[in-house]
Amino acid sequence: MKIIVSGCLLGNNCKYNGGNNYNENVVKFLENKDYIVICPEEMGKLTIPRVPSEIQYSKTADEVLKNEAKVLSKNGDDVTKYFIDGANKALEIAKRNNCKLAILKDGSPSCGSNYIYDGNFEGKKIYGKGVCARLLENNGIEVISEYDVL
């Protein structure tokens, strides 16, 4: 079984600010496992670096996927299309490779599996899913965060 994993957790500089979220526990967990590295935001054609984005006004990823809510950048640009496109590409890769598990970066508007930010760019976390995480879950793929890997 192949595993989908957020590239930033492996040290790839694909985070919004051009950095990464390297996580040694994830790297150790993946030793001797078959995995595929993704970055849904990069796959959706967002630049690196990029202006931070959040799902707006405590809305859900399901609402974004149904075009009932938006993902906006901190400067007010509607970047919803990029997030949905990247999530769809990640899902296509997961399906093509029969992936049943994804380890994604929590807090991300794409990859958050336990929490996201509330959409006001004030650093307030709320329970919720990122767009890609939710799409993968809606299609039967288990999504966990770096905090769930021990």
Image (spheres, rainbow, N blue to C red):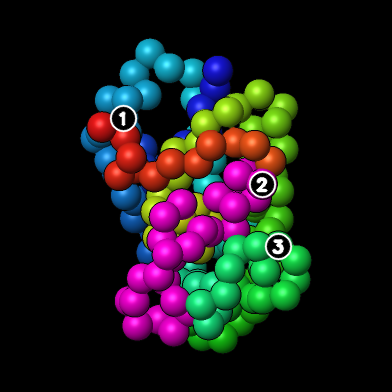
Q: Secondary structure at mark 3?
A: helix
Residue at the disc numbered 2: 138
Alpha carbon of mark 1 to alpha carbon of mark 3: how far?
Answer: 30 Å
Q: Quadrant of the C terminus?
A: top left
Instruction: Tell me the amino acid under the disc marked 1.
Output: Val
Residue 111: give its label: none
Measuring 64% from the left and 76% from the top, which residue is drawn there?
70
Mark 1 surroundings within 10 Å by alpha-carbon count, few (fewer than 14), some (14 through 19), many (20 or more): some
Q: Nearer the viewer, residue 42 or 78?
A: 78
- Report if the CB atoms under discs 3 and 2 are less than 8 Å apart: yes
Q: Nearer the viewer, mark 3 or mark 2?
A: 2
Q: Position of residue 77 (x, y in %)?
A: 61, 81
Residue 96 among those drawn in magenta? no
In the visual, does 70 lie left or right of 75? right
Q: Is residue 37 left or right of residue 94?
A: left
The x and y percentages for residue 64 are 67, 68
Q: Which residues are magenta?
A: 113-138
In the figure, 119 relative to 25: above or below? below
Q: Is residue 136 magenta?
A: yes
Residue 139 versus residue 27: which sits nearer the camera? Answer: 139
The outermost residue toward the right is 66
Q: Residues within 10 Å of mark 2 (few under 14, many from 20)?
A: few
Name the residue tied to disc 3.
65
**Residue 3, percent from left and from top:** 51, 27
- Please report the residue visible at 66 percent of the width from the left and 24 percent of the height from the top: 97
Query: What amino acid is found at the position of numbered circle 3 in the picture?
Result: Leu
Q: Name the N-terminal-most of marks 1 and 3.
A: 1
Residue 6 in sight in this render: no
The residue positioned 60% from the left and 27% from the top of the image is 99
Which amino acid, mark 2? Asn
